Amino acid sequence: MTTPFEHITSTANDTVKLLKSLNAKKARAETGLFLAEGARLVEEAMVHGWSPAYVLAGSDAASRPRTADLLARLKKAGARVLTASEKVLVSVSRKDNPQTLIAAFRQKLSRLADLDAAGPRRWVALYEVRDPGNLGTIVRTADASGVDGVILVGQCCDPFSVEAVRATMGSLFAMKLATADFATFDAWRRKAGARVVAASMHGKQRHDRADYGDRSIVLMGNEQAGLPADVEATCDELVRIPMNGAADSLNLAAAAAVMIYEVWRGRGYNGSDQ
């Protein structure tokens, strides 16, 4: 079955070269684009109003009614839609078994000033997190637990890297994401009246005994170094997650999940459909 879209078979095609380049941070910064792989992620992006620029679809997939409908919507939203050979899809995704749909979307970040600070709020702040898998997993956890936004503080890894986007499993498109240096973040949270509770090896009490308040920020530090002393000094409370065993620490994403869900539990899991 034929499709109404231009077909590409050469990895030397200029559009293919552009999409391949988005695996690198430099190209993402220069173009303002990033890759989302798979129909599920692309659908999530469309549902939440993200702007598509390019789409590659495997020829067989493009012939399926459901995918054809999605491609039509992507084209209507302004994307250049192309069908491609598997060789091209492998080249762009850098995976031997690529998804049959790969799209490039325009990046979108919120400003701190755009985060609604009225009423009870829950945010997560990540200080100089460097692992994209951790970042993506935390964004997914924040989305699942109804957090109001994730704030990347300082020199964090790129939330639009292929690895981070994959790890969010589509939650990137639903979650408000902001970036700021620490001084700007600290000034904003004080103006918002938000209480900062940080997980730290210097914490004196358990995370489930903390006073998170009605407007709270869970602050998590760098995977290796944690939080510097001057940052910890600005926090309202430092807490420790109890452990019992040979391990002396948790993976950052796991520790963040424990903290995030404790704040939610303390509010009776408000908004939960369970």
Image (cartoon, rainbow, N blue to C red):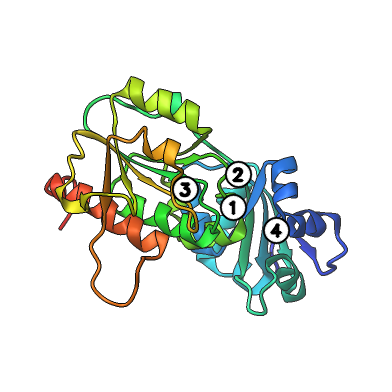
Identity of the amino acid at label 2? Lys
Considering only order in the chain, which callout, 3 or 4, is on the residue closer to the N terminus? 4
Mark 1 nearby-residue class (10 Å; few <14, some 14–19, many ≥20): some
Q: In the image, what residue occupies the spot 11% across and 48% down?
A: 268
SS at badge 2: helix
Provide the residue designation for mark 3: 173
* Disc 4 + disc 1, Cβ < 8 Å: no
Which-is-in-front pick, marks 4 and 3? 4
In primary-sequence order, the first of circles 4 and 1 is 4
| Mark 1 or mark 3, whichever is nearer to me | 3
The residue most toward the right is: 12
Which residue does the numbered mark 4 point to in the structure image?
A: 23
Q: Are marks 1 and 2 in contact (CB under 8 Å)?
A: yes
What distance separates the C-alpha of mark 4 from that of mark 3? 19 Å
Instruction: Find numbered disc 3 in the image and state the secondary structure of the residue it sits on.
Output: helix
Q: Which residue is mark 1?
A: 72
Q: Crowdedness of circle 4 by 10 Å Cα count: few (<14), some, many (20+)?
A: some
